[in-house]
Amino acid sequence: MAIDNSGITISNNSIADYYLSTNNSNGIYIASASSAWSITGNRFYQTATRTSTSAGCIVKAIQIVTASGVNYTISNNIIGYANASGTGTTTYAGGGFNLRYTAIDVTVGTATASNIQGNTITNISVTGSNSAASNVNLWLLVVCMQDLENVGTTTANIIGASTETGSIVASSSTNLFIVNGIYSTSSGTVSIQNNIIGSISATGFCCNCAPVLSGIQVAGTGGLYHFI
């Protein structure tokens, strides 16, 4: 009989320098047969510039991929900066290759809602480039979720900053690229409320590489979204 790996807590850790220059990397990765994990109060950062040496690398601070898992809590984490003291900038460079970055990526079930609350995602710089043609060279999905979630319903998530400029910087030297503060593609009900999204800049270096920048983008087929 399969036993669900549930009720795990990961809290108050500094998770730094998680990076592979030739492949995908995650600060925390939770896969199948899991439910009801709590990821709270952690810091995720890079102490030096991280440069890709292979095409298509994807970096994620937190990734949960449990299609039947439910009731996750991701709260009060700080993603960005260059140290645990909250100074400097986490910097990713494409190094001549396309690079994608996601702070929080959640794919979960619909029986019980998961919660993404009170996280701060800021002081991050991502640069992507590619000598070959590509529709998306850099895709910054600050929060990506599928199915049933509450995002900021009790405590606002801060993505970038409310008053500054350039807290999150994305740039690419070729073709179209996409930057989203919150991106949701869901088959269930998603509540997105109270979040603070700002101080995000997206820059292309040629006439064919203009970015598409959205604070919140919804692409799902779910029955209901709540925006307040």
Image (cartoon, rainbow, N blue to C red):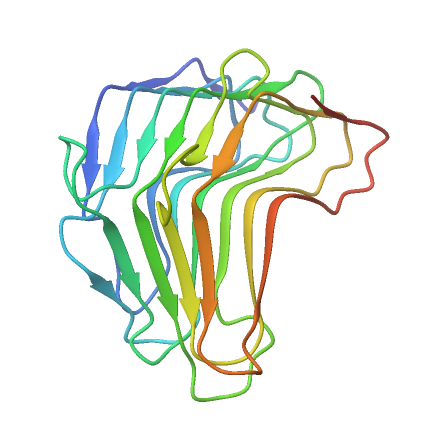
Question: Which residue is depicted at the point 54% across and 26% down?
Answer: 195
- What is the residue that sits farthest to the right in this orientation? 223
- What is the residue that sits farthest to the bottom in this orientation? 132
On the image, the x and y values in percent for residue 71 come to: 57, 17
Does residue 73 appear to the left or right of 94 in the view shown?
Answer: right
**Image quadrant where one finds the C terminus:** top right
- The answer to whether 200 is drawn above or below residue 132 in the figure is above
On the image, the x and y values in percent for residue 115 come to: 55, 19
Determine if residue 57 is in view: no
Does residue 45 appear to the left or right of 187 in the view shown?
Answer: left
Question: Which residue is depicted at the point 37% across and 20% down?
Answer: 76
Q: Nearer the viewer, residue 136 or 58?
A: 136
- The answer to whether 199 is drawn above or below residue 93 in the figure is above
Determine if residue 154 is in view: yes
On the image, the x and y values in percent for residue 201 come to: 45, 55
Q: How many marks?
A: 0
**Image quadrant where one finds the N terminus:** top right
On the image, the x and y values in percent for residue 107 come to: 59, 37
Q: Nearer the viewer, residue 192 or 113?
A: 192
- The answer to whether 210 is drawn above or below residue 115 in the figure is below
Q: Nearer the viewer, residue 116 or 25?
A: 116
Does residue 223 appear to the left or right of 65 in the view shown?
Answer: right
- The answer to whether 159 is drawn above or below residue 126 in the figure is above
Determine the image quadrant of residue 53: bottom left
